[in-house]
Image (cartoon, rainbow, N blue to C red):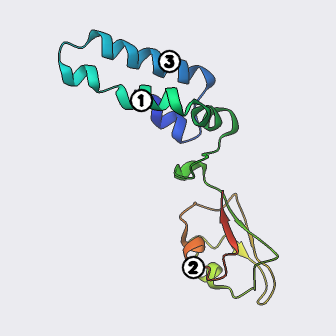
Amino acid sequence: MLEILERITTGKGEPADIDKLERLAKLVKRSSLCGLGRAAPNPVLSTLEHYRDEYEAHVRDKRCPARQCVSLLHYEILPDQCTGCTACARKCPVACIAGERRQPHTIDQAKCIKCGACFAACKFGAIERR
C-alpha cells in the first residue's frame, strides 16, 4: 500500500492504482487476525471514501489540490506582483530564476527542484505555489 501511495504522491500513479489500493486495503482489513491489522487500512479507506477526487487529481492531472506533495508542486512568479527585487533569485539554490533588476522574473520549470526557497524569500507575495 505504501508503494502505491508513494507512486501516486510523486505523480507516477496510474488510474488502476486507486482501485488496487482500495482492494488491498479491504483485503488487509478482512484478513488480519488482530485488531491493529484490521484498523491499519482505515485511514486509506476513509480518505478514498471522502477525498477520492484528490486521489484522481494526483493520478489524472499530476497535481495535488492540497499543495502538500512536493513532487507535484509548481512555483510560478506573478508578473504583475513581482517588483524585480531579486530576493528569490538570490535564494534559489539551482539558479533557475531569471530576470533583470526591477523587472518581473521567471522560473525555469525544467531546472526548478521545488524546494520553496523562492516562495519563502518573496516579501511581496509574487510567487504562487500551485
C-alpha separation, residue under disc 3 versus residue under disc 2? 41 Å
Can you tell which of label 1 and label 2 is closer to the viewer?
A: 1
The front one of 127 and 6 is 127
Please state which amino acid type lies under the numbered disc 2.
Ala
Return the residue at label 1. Answer: 44
- Position of residue 112 relative to residue 52, above or below, is below
Dot placed on the residue nearer the N-terminal end, 1 or 3: 3
Disc 3 crowd, CA 10 A, few/some/many (<14, 14-19, 20+): few
Return the residue at label 2. Answer: 121
Quadrant in the picture for residue 130: bottom right
Please state which amino acid type lies under the numbered disc 1.
Val
Return the residue at label 3. Answer: 20
Residue at 79% across, 85% down: 100
C-alpha separation, residue under disc 1 versus residue under disc 2? 35 Å
The front one of 43 and 108 is 43
Callout 1 secondary element: helix
Q: Position of residue 97 (x, y in %)?
A: 69, 73
Dot placed on the residue nearer the N-terminal end, 3 or 2: 3
